[in-house]
Amino acid sequence: MRKILVIMMVVMPVALWAQFAPAQDKPGTTAMHADSSAFVAWATGCVAEPGPMNITNPGAGLAGQGWPAENAIGFPEGTYSVTCLGDGGMATLTFDSPICNGEGPDFAVFENGFANAQQPDMWFLELGFVEVSSDGENFFRFPAVSMVQTDTQVGGMGCIDPAQIHNLASKYGAMYGTPFDLDEVPDDPLLDKNSITHVRIIDVIGDIDPEYCTYDSQGHPVNDPWPTPFASGGMDLDAVGVIHDVAHTPGLGIADNEMESISVYPNPAHDYIRVETQSMASVQTIDLYNVTGQKVLSSNEKEINVSALEPGVYFVRINCGENIFTERVIIK
Protein backbone atom coordinates (compact mmCIF):
# COMPACT_ATOMS: atom_id res chain seq x y z
CA MET A 1 0.00 0.00 0.00
CA ARG A 2 2.81 2.39 0.90
CA LYS A 3 4.50 1.69 -2.44
CA ILE A 4 1.26 2.50 -4.27
CA LEU A 5 0.93 5.79 -2.39
CA VAL A 6 4.49 6.76 -3.28
CA ILE A 7 3.86 6.03 -6.95
CA MET A 8 0.64 8.08 -6.85
CA MET A 9 2.51 11.02 -5.32
CA VAL A 10 5.16 10.85 -8.04
CA VAL A 11 2.68 10.88 -10.91
CA MET A 12 0.16 13.24 -9.32
CA PRO A 13 0.00 16.53 -11.27
CA VAL A 14 2.20 19.16 -9.71
CA ALA A 15 -0.66 21.64 -10.12
CA LEU A 16 -2.47 19.90 -7.29
CA TRP A 17 0.39 20.67 -4.91
CA ALA A 18 1.40 24.15 -5.95
CA GLN A 19 -0.91 26.48 -4.10
CA PHE A 20 0.24 30.06 -3.83
CA ALA A 21 -1.55 32.99 -2.17
CA PRO A 22 -5.30 32.84 -2.92
CA ALA A 23 -7.72 35.40 -4.35
CA GLN A 24 -8.18 38.82 -2.77
CA ASP A 25 -11.25 37.77 -0.79
CA LYS A 26 -9.63 34.68 0.76
CA PRO A 27 -7.63 34.22 3.99
CA GLY A 28 -3.91 34.30 3.32
CA THR A 29 -4.15 36.54 0.27
CA THR A 30 -1.31 38.96 -0.50
CA ALA A 31 -3.58 41.34 -2.43
CA MET A 32 -3.06 45.03 -1.60
CA HIS A 33 -5.92 47.48 -2.00
CA ALA A 34 -5.04 50.74 -3.72
CA ASP A 35 -6.05 52.69 -0.60
CA SER A 36 -3.42 50.93 1.53
CA SER A 37 -1.19 53.29 3.49
CA ALA A 38 1.75 51.13 2.41
CA PHE A 39 1.86 52.95 -0.94
CA VAL A 40 4.10 56.01 -0.90
CA ALA A 41 4.08 56.86 -4.64
CA TRP A 42 2.78 55.88 -8.06
CA ALA A 43 4.34 55.64 -11.52
CA THR A 44 4.82 59.04 -13.15
CA GLY A 45 5.79 57.94 -16.66
CA CYS A 46 4.79 55.16 -19.03
CA VAL A 47 5.79 54.11 -22.54
CA ALA A 48 3.60 51.39 -24.07
CA GLU A 49 4.45 49.12 -27.00
CA PRO A 50 1.25 47.12 -27.63
CA GLY A 51 1.34 43.76 -29.36
CA PRO A 52 -1.14 42.44 -31.94
CA MET A 53 -4.77 41.87 -31.01
CA ASN A 54 -4.22 38.26 -32.09
CA ILE A 55 -0.69 36.97 -32.50
CA THR A 56 -1.88 34.33 -34.98
CA ASN A 57 -3.34 37.07 -37.19
CA PRO A 58 -0.95 40.05 -37.01
CA GLY A 59 -2.60 41.63 -40.04
CA ALA A 60 -5.64 42.44 -37.90
CA GLY A 61 -3.67 45.22 -36.23
CA LEU A 62 -2.31 46.16 -32.84
CA ALA A 63 -4.19 46.34 -29.57
CA GLY A 64 -4.24 49.45 -27.41
CA GLN A 65 -6.00 51.88 -29.75
CA GLY A 66 -7.97 54.18 -27.47
CA TRP A 67 -6.21 52.84 -24.38
CA PRO A 68 -3.15 55.13 -24.11
CA ALA A 69 -0.04 54.68 -21.98
CA GLU A 70 -1.01 57.65 -19.78
CA ASN A 71 -3.81 55.54 -18.30
CA ALA A 72 -1.22 53.58 -16.31
CA ILE A 73 0.19 56.70 -14.61
CA GLY A 74 -0.86 57.58 -11.09
CA PHE A 75 -3.57 56.06 -8.89
CA PRO A 76 -5.53 53.11 -10.39
CA GLU A 77 -9.01 53.63 -11.78
CA GLY A 78 -10.13 50.02 -11.53
CA THR A 79 -12.43 50.19 -14.58
CA TYR A 80 -11.73 51.20 -18.17
CA SER A 81 -8.94 53.74 -17.73
CA VAL A 82 -6.18 51.22 -18.45
CA THR A 83 -3.37 50.57 -20.91
CA CYS A 84 -4.10 47.50 -23.04
CA LEU A 85 -1.03 45.55 -24.12
CA GLY A 86 -2.31 43.00 -26.64
CA ASP A 87 -0.51 39.69 -27.27
CA GLY A 88 3.05 39.98 -25.98
CA GLY A 89 2.98 43.79 -25.79
CA MET A 90 4.70 45.68 -23.04
CA ALA A 91 4.71 48.88 -21.00
CA THR A 92 7.70 50.44 -19.25
CA LEU A 93 7.00 52.64 -16.23
CA THR A 94 9.17 55.20 -14.48
CA PHE A 95 9.01 57.00 -11.15
CA ASP A 96 9.90 60.30 -9.50
CA SER A 97 12.13 58.47 -7.01
CA PRO A 98 13.77 55.07 -7.64
CA ILE A 99 12.21 52.00 -6.02
CA CYS A 100 14.42 50.31 -3.44
CA ASN A 101 14.57 46.91 -1.75
CA GLY A 102 12.92 47.16 1.65
CA GLU A 103 11.34 44.67 4.01
CA GLY A 104 8.67 42.63 2.20
CA PRO A 105 7.11 43.69 -1.12
CA ASP A 106 8.51 46.80 -2.77
CA PHE A 107 5.84 47.63 -5.37
CA ALA A 108 2.53 46.30 -6.68
CA VAL A 109 1.00 46.04 -10.15
CA PHE A 110 -2.70 46.74 -10.70
CA GLU A 111 -4.98 45.36 -13.42
CA ASN A 112 -8.77 45.15 -13.77
CA GLY A 113 -9.58 41.45 -13.45
CA PHE A 114 -12.93 40.24 -12.13
CA ALA A 115 -14.46 37.19 -10.47
CA ASN A 116 -16.50 34.48 -12.15
CA ALA A 117 -19.98 34.67 -10.60
CA GLN A 118 -20.64 30.97 -11.23
CA GLN A 119 -17.24 29.76 -9.95
CA PRO A 120 -16.24 31.75 -6.83
CA ASP A 121 -12.60 30.59 -6.88
CA MET A 122 -12.07 31.42 -10.56
CA TRP A 123 -11.15 34.85 -11.94
CA PHE A 124 -10.77 36.47 -15.35
CA LEU A 125 -7.09 37.46 -15.18
CA GLU A 126 -4.92 38.57 -18.10
CA LEU A 127 -1.40 37.95 -16.84
CA GLY A 128 1.92 39.69 -17.38
CA PHE A 129 5.58 39.08 -16.68
CA VAL A 130 7.32 41.72 -14.55
CA GLU A 131 10.87 42.96 -15.07
CA VAL A 132 12.94 45.65 -13.34
CA SER A 133 15.94 47.76 -14.29
CA SER A 134 18.23 50.23 -12.58
CA ASP A 135 19.61 51.73 -15.80
CA GLY A 136 16.76 51.49 -18.33
CA GLU A 137 18.79 49.12 -20.52
CA ASN A 138 19.29 45.87 -18.63
CA PHE A 139 16.06 44.27 -17.40
CA PHE A 140 15.67 41.35 -15.01
CA ARG A 141 12.53 39.22 -14.69
CA PHE A 142 10.80 38.04 -11.55
CA PRO A 143 10.77 34.21 -11.54
CA ALA A 144 7.14 33.66 -12.50
CA VAL A 145 5.28 30.40 -11.92
CA SER A 146 1.99 29.27 -13.46
CA MET A 147 0.50 25.92 -12.43
CA VAL A 148 -2.65 26.41 -14.52
CA GLN A 149 -3.32 23.24 -16.50
CA THR A 150 -2.06 23.22 -20.08
CA ASP A 151 -4.17 20.37 -21.50
CA THR A 152 -6.96 22.70 -22.60
CA GLN A 153 -6.74 26.31 -23.76
CA VAL A 154 -8.35 28.83 -21.40
CA GLY A 155 -10.87 30.55 -23.69
CA GLY A 156 -11.06 34.25 -24.47
CA MET A 157 -13.49 34.80 -21.60
CA GLY A 158 -12.22 31.90 -19.49
CA CYS A 159 -11.07 32.10 -15.88
CA ILE A 160 -8.20 30.78 -13.77
CA ASP A 161 -7.45 30.23 -10.08
CA PRO A 162 -5.19 32.94 -8.56
CA ALA A 163 -3.81 30.33 -6.14
CA GLN A 164 -2.00 28.72 -9.09
CA ILE A 165 -0.17 31.94 -10.00
CA HIS A 166 3.00 33.44 -8.50
CA ASN A 167 5.10 36.47 -9.54
CA LEU A 168 2.84 37.29 -12.47
CA ALA A 169 1.10 40.65 -12.71
CA SER A 170 -2.72 40.63 -12.66
CA LYS A 171 -3.02 37.87 -10.08
CA TYR A 172 -5.78 39.93 -8.42
CA GLY A 173 -8.89 41.81 -9.49
CA ALA A 174 -9.55 45.51 -9.99
CA MET A 175 -8.19 47.91 -7.34
CA TYR A 176 -6.12 45.13 -5.73
CA GLY A 177 -2.42 45.15 -6.54
CA THR A 178 -0.18 42.12 -6.98
CA PRO A 179 2.90 42.71 -4.77
CA PHE A 180 6.48 42.08 -5.87
CA ASP A 181 9.51 41.69 -3.60
CA LEU A 182 12.87 42.60 -5.15
CA ASP A 183 14.52 39.92 -3.01
CA GLU A 184 12.99 37.38 -5.40
CA VAL A 185 14.88 38.71 -8.43
CA PRO A 186 18.27 36.94 -8.76
CA ASP A 187 21.21 39.19 -7.92
CA ASP A 188 23.18 40.53 -10.85
CA PRO A 189 26.05 43.05 -11.08
CA LEU A 190 24.00 45.04 -13.61
CA LEU A 191 21.05 45.44 -11.25
CA ASP A 192 21.00 47.82 -8.28
CA LYS A 193 18.01 46.74 -6.23
CA ASN A 194 18.17 49.96 -4.23
CA SER A 195 17.78 52.10 -7.33
CA ILE A 196 15.08 50.62 -9.59
CA THR A 197 14.25 53.28 -12.15
CA HIS A 198 12.11 51.18 -14.51
CA VAL A 199 9.41 48.52 -14.12
CA ARG A 200 8.41 46.69 -17.29
CA ILE A 201 5.19 44.68 -17.73
CA ILE A 202 5.06 42.18 -20.62
CA ASP A 203 1.78 40.55 -21.59
CA VAL A 204 1.61 36.77 -21.31
CA ILE A 205 0.33 35.68 -24.71
CA GLY A 206 -1.70 32.89 -23.11
CA ASP A 207 -1.89 30.66 -26.17
CA ILE A 208 -0.66 27.16 -25.27
CA ASP A 209 0.25 26.36 -28.88
CA PRO A 210 4.05 25.80 -28.80
CA GLU A 211 4.42 28.12 -31.79
CA TYR A 212 3.14 31.10 -29.82
CA CYS A 213 3.16 30.27 -26.10
CA THR A 214 5.24 31.97 -23.44
CA TYR A 215 6.86 30.04 -20.59
CA ASP A 216 7.27 30.62 -16.87
CA SER A 217 10.55 30.29 -14.98
CA GLN A 218 10.06 26.53 -14.67
CA GLY A 219 9.41 25.92 -18.35
CA HIS A 220 5.61 25.64 -18.10
CA PRO A 221 3.50 27.27 -20.83
CA VAL A 222 1.43 30.05 -19.26
CA ASN A 223 -2.25 29.48 -20.01
CA ASP A 224 -4.54 32.50 -19.59
CA PRO A 225 -7.63 33.90 -21.39
CA TRP A 226 -6.94 33.72 -25.14
CA PRO A 227 -7.71 34.78 -27.81
CA THR A 228 -8.85 38.33 -27.06
CA PRO A 229 -8.85 39.76 -30.62
CA PHE A 230 -9.94 43.32 -29.93
CA ALA A 231 -8.38 46.68 -29.13
CA SER A 232 -8.63 46.13 -25.38
CA GLY A 233 -7.12 42.64 -25.59
CA GLY A 234 -4.16 41.43 -23.59
CA MET A 235 -3.21 42.57 -20.12
CA ASP A 236 -4.95 45.79 -19.02
CA LEU A 237 -2.35 47.67 -16.97
CA ASP A 238 -3.98 50.04 -14.50
CA ALA A 239 -1.14 51.29 -12.27
CA VAL A 240 2.07 50.51 -10.42
CA GLY A 241 2.15 51.50 -6.76
CA VAL A 242 5.44 52.04 -4.93
CA ILE A 243 5.90 50.69 -1.41
CA HIS A 244 9.61 51.38 -0.88
CA ASP A 245 11.52 54.12 -2.66
CA VAL A 246 14.67 56.11 -2.10
CA ALA A 247 12.87 59.29 -1.07
CA HIS A 248 10.97 57.59 1.76
CA THR A 249 13.59 55.13 3.01
CA PRO A 250 15.91 56.16 5.89
CA GLY A 251 19.54 55.82 4.92
CA LEU A 252 18.77 56.00 1.19
CA GLY A 253 16.81 59.23 0.86
CA ILE A 254 18.20 62.54 2.04
CA ALA A 255 17.15 63.65 5.49
CA ASP A 256 14.91 66.70 5.79
CA ASN A 257 17.72 68.98 6.98
CA GLU A 258 19.90 67.88 4.05
CA MET A 259 17.06 68.44 1.57
CA GLU A 260 16.71 71.98 2.82
CA SER A 261 20.39 72.59 2.01
CA ILE A 262 19.95 71.55 -1.65
CA SER A 263 18.30 73.69 -4.28
CA VAL A 264 17.81 73.19 -8.02
CA TYR A 265 17.19 76.33 -10.06
CA PRO A 266 15.96 78.01 -12.17
CA ASN A 267 12.73 76.06 -12.40
CA PRO A 268 11.33 76.39 -15.04
CA ALA A 269 14.69 76.45 -16.85
CA HIS A 270 15.75 77.33 -20.37
CA ASP A 271 19.53 77.37 -20.82
CA TYR A 272 20.93 75.75 -17.69
CA ILE A 273 20.10 74.08 -14.38
CA ARG A 274 22.21 74.80 -11.34
CA VAL A 275 22.47 72.67 -8.19
CA GLU A 276 23.46 74.36 -4.95
CA THR A 277 24.24 72.55 -1.72
CA GLN A 278 26.20 73.35 1.41
CA SER A 279 28.19 70.15 0.95
CA MET A 280 28.87 70.08 -2.79
CA ALA A 281 32.02 68.03 -2.22
CA SER A 282 29.82 65.04 -1.28
CA VAL A 283 27.95 65.09 -4.60
CA GLN A 284 29.18 62.31 -6.88
CA THR A 285 26.99 62.77 -9.95
CA ILE A 286 24.07 64.85 -11.14
CA ASP A 287 21.88 63.09 -13.71
CA LEU A 288 18.95 64.36 -15.73
CA TYR A 289 16.16 61.95 -16.81
CA ASN A 290 13.21 62.51 -19.13
CA VAL A 291 9.69 61.32 -18.26
CA THR A 292 10.30 57.91 -19.85
CA GLY A 293 13.21 57.31 -17.47
CA GLN A 294 15.99 57.76 -20.04
CA LYS A 295 19.12 59.48 -18.79
CA VAL A 296 19.70 62.45 -21.08
CA LEU A 297 22.52 64.29 -19.31
CA SER A 298 25.08 63.55 -16.60
CA SER A 299 27.58 65.80 -14.85
CA ASN A 300 29.68 66.19 -11.72
CA GLU A 301 29.57 69.96 -12.04
CA LYS A 302 27.18 72.36 -10.32
CA GLU A 303 25.73 73.58 -13.59
CA ILE A 304 24.19 71.55 -16.45
CA ASN A 305 23.57 73.03 -19.88
CA VAL A 306 20.03 72.03 -20.94
CA SER A 307 19.63 74.33 -23.94
CA ALA A 308 19.71 71.42 -26.40
CA LEU A 309 16.89 69.50 -24.72
CA GLU A 310 13.29 69.42 -25.88
CA PRO A 311 10.85 71.36 -23.67
CA GLY A 312 9.09 69.23 -21.10
CA VAL A 313 9.26 67.68 -17.64
CA TYR A 314 12.55 66.19 -16.43
CA PHE A 315 13.95 64.79 -13.20
CA VAL A 316 17.26 65.83 -11.65
CA ARG A 317 18.83 63.04 -9.62
CA ILE A 318 21.62 64.11 -7.26
CA ASN A 319 23.76 61.20 -6.07
CA CYS A 320 25.51 62.00 -2.80
CA GLY A 321 26.85 58.51 -2.22
CA GLU A 322 24.72 57.17 0.63
CA ASN A 323 21.90 59.60 -0.14
CA ILE A 324 20.01 60.41 -3.33
CA PHE A 325 17.82 63.45 -3.98
CA THR A 326 15.36 63.72 -6.87
CA GLU A 327 13.74 66.96 -8.05
CA ARG A 328 11.24 67.54 -10.84
CA VAL A 329 12.09 70.40 -13.20
CA ILE A 330 10.46 71.95 -16.25
CA ILE A 331 12.48 72.96 -19.28
CA LYS A 332 10.91 75.54 -21.59
Image (cartoon, rainbow, N blue to C red):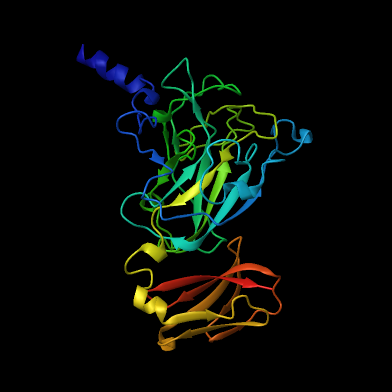
Residue closest to the eye, 152 or 180: 180
Residue 272 seen in this snapshot:
yes
Position of residue 151 in the picture relative to residue 20 (left or right): right
Figure quadrant of the N terminus? top left
Residue closest to the eye, 41 or 145: 41
Residue, x 42% and y 30% (percent of image)? 162
Residue 284 seen in this snapshot:
no
Residue, x 48% and y 44% (percent of image)? 109
Q: Is residue 82 above or below residue 20?
A: below
Q: Position of residue 159 (x, y in %)?
A: 51, 23
Q: Is residue 316 above or below residue 300?
A: above
Q: How many marks?
A: 0
Residue, x 76% and y 37% (percent of image)? 61
Q: Position of residue 246 (x, y in %)?
A: 41, 64
Q: Position of residue 332 (x, y in %)?
A: 69, 73
Q: Position of residue 79 (x, y in %)?
A: 56, 35
